[in-house]
Amino acid sequence: MLSIGELFDWLTDPENWTGRYGLANLLVEHLTLTLVSLTIAGLLAIPIGIAIGQSGRGETLVIALSSASRAIPTMGLMFALVMLMGVEFRQFAVVLALVGIAIPPVLAGSYAGIKSIPLGIREGARAQGMTTLQQIRHVGLPLSAPSMIGGFKIAYLQVVSTVVLAPLVGLGGLGFGIIQGLALRDFAQLTGSALVIVLLSITGERLLAKAQSKLDRRLTH
Amino acid sequence: MEWAAKNFDFVLQLSLTHVLISLVPLFLGSVFAFALVRLTPPKLAGTIGTTFSAIYAIPSLAIFVALPAVIGTSYLGPTNVVIALSVYVAASMFFSTRDAFNQVPQPTVFIARAQGLSPFQLFVHVELPLAIPGLIAGLRVAAASTVSMASIGAIVGVRNLGYLFLDGFQRKIPEEILTGLFAIFLIGIALDIGLMALGKALTPWTRRSAQHA
Amino acid sequence: MTKQIRKSIKSAIALSAVALLGLAGCADSNSEPLVIGSQAYYSNEIVAEVYAQVLEDAGYSVDRQFALGQRDVYVPALLAGEVDLFPEYTGNLLQYFDPEATATAEEDVYQALQGALPAGLTALALSGASDQDSYNVTSDFAMKNNLTSIADLAGVSGLRLGGAPELAERPYGPTGLMSFYGVTVEFEATGDTTVESLVAGLIDMANVYSADPRIQQLGLVTLTDPQGLFLSSNLVPIASDAVNQEARDLISAVSSAMTAADLVALNVRSVDEQLSSAEIARDWLVSKGLID
């Protein structure tokens, strides 16, 4: 079994941080794929979620979609899309898969956020003569922000988790250390990479959770 | 789909393994979470909650490879994956179970106690039945995640439907990957419907009141 | 009832019968199922299926543990007795146990391997079927740069090499290319997208197994290896001490019967006809008269 010393040595060896497959570059690749996918998902899901939340139409679709999305085998989706689009477009295929995985939670969060705004407030804003856009900007978005961020939090975890599998289709990301470590039986590399991935997930999750509760507190004092 | 027809027996075998690899953690994890919620003092609840949040945030492949180093299981074989999946289920079910019992109405509990029910009778006849909808809801979420996460176990050698993804991609057979996706989808739906039916069966009063309404 | 289910019931009955015999005091080496493993490589799995079916046909009970992954994962399992039989490749396995090995020719590698195997493992009969790592380029790239051997690559700049992630650390990987041929490459971990990436021009040279049908199908050019960067590598069954002599003879017979052309044909059936390894193995064994 691996000793803490061996693990520490591997993590602190500059050789393991430099180069195309060094931890530094892999971390950047991992974050890039994650942030790009989350942004695209947000741009698509938030407006739709707000629209459904305000009008009430399409509710059942949102609820069904968000519970069904948990059941998607991310590895299968990624492989299927890469095979479909061909290896030259594998970055695009992977981002597409990631966006597909991120949309349901963000959509659910936006929808739930708008839905939870008391009817009185929503109607009050309309009575004041605000245009739809103004309603969204001054009432909808601020009040549904905590729930939206909650949706992003779930999406972040699922996306980071799926990017771990990206090396299986020839991309980079922190999963490389796991795949290569598994093949070479290099337990230090295996566990060290897993550790960095864990830190990345937990840090992001905690940051988003904090943002969520801060916004929540601000609205409910 | 020709490929699926030609390899039906094989896909069936993989599906059976997949169902087992999903059900066992579902059971173990929920029982463990249940015990934690009911038996640990409220003081520890916060710490346990934070720990589980952290664990739930960890990507499954990372846990599959890190767990053997931590607890000494072998990388090969289903034990490692079953334990890891059970931990995930426990993490998710901890919060669902806690919420399910928290939303049992306090007045109902008071009345039952005032009527002289012992703590055990209170639990079995009042709290548990009223918590079932919440528990079932939590189980459905956990079941969906477990069924899809189990496929990643194929990377560490577990012979379940995830194998169809890896082999299909290696041999460049799209139908194989699609068969895997479809099979997992079917299993997920079957489990979901099964759990919903279980919930309805365990809460006959909700059905009766709907009829009288 | 399907053949698979019938087979499982057959083995269950066989197992129980044997267990009863064991209980009755007859020491029977067939009472423990033999565990046969394979790599996460469809071709290797077909050969493992062949071993499994030959043994089952002779009455042994077999436990299939396929897709175990890399050598570094399953060799310890072999040594620990968790796996009893495994289809392997002489050259790669020799390098695993003896990184300094100098043998390159087929027979020499086989002899060296037998010497290098640790106690508890034996190499059974060598197969004529070879399936080894090889460096390939597209025919266009070969023509453009006048390439026939790996040595010719020394004159090409900006070479991108693709292969499985672990290739980066293998002795025949980038370091070997430099020390044997003075060739510098940039490594891309393309994994299972290697051949597609080569054809799409995302990489210039790729490590492709020599028995991969796509080399012929896509007109790839395999660069010759005059300096012996790659050891000659043939299929060979590796058995633990748990495998008795009768089983060993059965497996050796099968191993000797498989030719290089046979292996490529088996791979073609897997990739083109998309059949399962069990079916392909059965058809081949029946066609060779090794089982009925």
Image (cartoon, coloured by chain):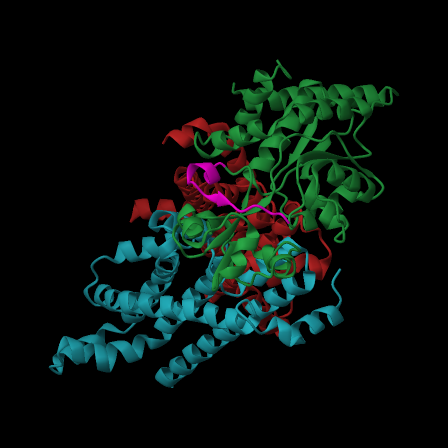
Which chain is drawn using red?
A: B
Find the residue positioned furthest to the left: A129
**Quadrant location of the N terminus of chain B in the rendered image:** top left
User: B130 or B170, which lies in front?
Assistant: B170
User: C16 or B168, which lies in front?
Assistant: B168
Vertical order, C139 against C249 (above or below): below
Q: Name the residue at 26% across, 74% down.
A: A118
- Is C64 on the left or on the right of C138, as rendered? right
Expressed as whole percent of the image width and height from the top left, the position of residue C166 reads: 60, 56
Vertical order, C202 against B196 (above or below): below
| Residue C216 located within the stretch drawn in magenta | yes
| Residue C131 located within the stretch drawn in magenta | no
Expressed as whole percent of the image width and height from the top left, the position of residue A82 reads: 39, 51
Vertical order, A4 against C13 (above or below): below
Which chain is drawn using cyan?
A: A
Vertical order, A138 against C139 (above or below): below
Q: Name the residue at 72% across, 59% down.
A: B71
- Is C247 on the left or on the right of B149, as rendered? right
Q: Quadrant of residue C250?
A: top right
- Is C61 on the left or on the right of B195, as rendered? right
Q: Quadrant of residue B45?
A: bottom right
Magenta region: C213-226
Drawing shade for chain C: green
Residue B97 appears in the picture as rendered:
no
Expressed as whole percent of the image width and height from the top left, the position of residue A126 reads: 14, 77
Q: Name the residue at 31% across, 64% down.
A: A107
Residue C64 appears in the picture as rendered:
yes
